[in-house]
Image (cartoon, rainbow, N blue to C red):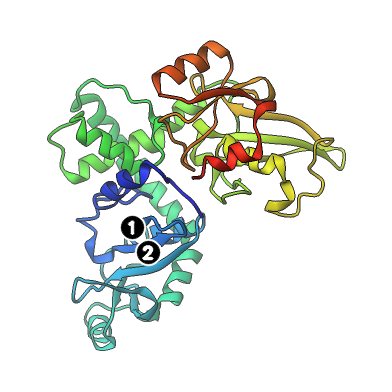
Amino acid sequence: MKRLVFALLFVNWLMATAWCPICGNDLKIHQATAHKAKLHNGTERHYCSLRCLVVDSQEYGIDDIRVRDYQNKTFIDANGSLYVVGSSLQGVHSKLSKVAFANPKDAQAFARQKGGVIKSFEEARKIALDSLKTDNAYDAKIKTAKIYPMGKKIYTQKCKSFAIELNDFLEIDELKSHIETQNLCPHLNARQFQALALYLWEQQRHNVWEDIEDRVVVGEDEKCPVCGMFTYKYPRWAAQIFFAHDHHEHHVSFDGVKDLMKFYFDPNKWGNYQHIHAKTMTKILVTNYYTQKAIDAKSAFYVIGSDTYGPMGHELIPFGSLPEALSFKNDHRGEKIVRFDEITPAMVYALDK
């Protein structure tokens, strides 16, 4: 699946060498459990742990999975490796540690010394997947008790006075890159920097969005039917189609107007959606880029061809009024402004090129 494409590719490559895009962990510190993989669009992603790789794979198709050999410190094919699970080493986002080896003798020697059981990659991945819910709860407990309070204290006492539009960032590693390159909070060690980032990303960002009235509300289990992404992660871009079925109103959520329009033109291309068509659609909501409030898609104004990218690259960026759209178009080198009824399939799919 496509993800964070076009102009973001180079930025992602830079950030992938620094922090995990899922949790923000410093990859230099977590080299022993590091993983790499490629998304189906060819973008390479670096992770701090098997757990974060598993989280990403729930949302996107990934290929060419590699893991760092604990013994030789080089990346190896994960499918041919052996994992020692549950050793005395501290786990990363998990109570069970997971480290990989290319040589069976190295894995056996490590297990004799540090404990744990030897598993194949698929077995280790299944263990990580099955324990994800409890591991996340364990992680959340630690964050709430220690990390968020530390991050808040650092933000209020050690950082320069700064305000960040947190919904401008697609992932936590982008936020960390911005803070570092802009020197917004200097002289922090890796532990302090991670606490600050987690506080801003997981608490402040959530609070900011919750304070917005009349927003597009998306559940954490909702996926975009077009790309498979969890739409709640991208509130600035959230969009929904509502429809009537069995005497009830239902909705489908999207991570941007582009995917919404792909679905709108041909719902059945993306699954069994025979009950969704023009006569059953009751309303369509998109998120005003400036106010971040829900607006009627059919009355909105859309800027195409700007230098601003959404989770899926180039986007149709919605606004509630023509002056808003004109201002954005001028500030962000947009090509043109269109209304809902002027959008065509060719126009939408051209945004992927």
Horizontally, is 60 left or right of 23 in the view?
Answer: right
Asked if residue 28 can be seen in this view, the reply is: yes
Horizontally, is 28 left or right of 331 in the view?
Answer: left
Horizontally, is 125 left or right of 302 in the view?
Answer: left
Any mark on residue 50, and which? 2
Residue 231 picture quarter: top right
Can you give x and y, in whole percent of width and height, for residue 72 in the image? 18, 76
Mark 1 lies on a secondary structure that is strand
Can you give x and y, in whole percent of width and height, for residue 52 in the image? 39, 57
Asked if disc 1 and disc 2 are in contact, CB closer than 8 Å, the reply is: yes
Q: Amino acid at mark 1?
A: Tyr
**Residue at mark 1:** 47
Picture layout, residue 305 above or below residue 21:
above
Nearer to the camera, 71 or 92: 71
Residue 55 picture quarter: bottom left
For the view shown, which residue lies furthest in the top direction? 323
Binning the other alpha carbons within 10 Å of mark 1 as few (below 14), some (14 to 19) or many (20 upward) gives: many
Q: Amino acid at mark 2?
A: Leu
Picture layout, residue 109 above or below residue 323:
below
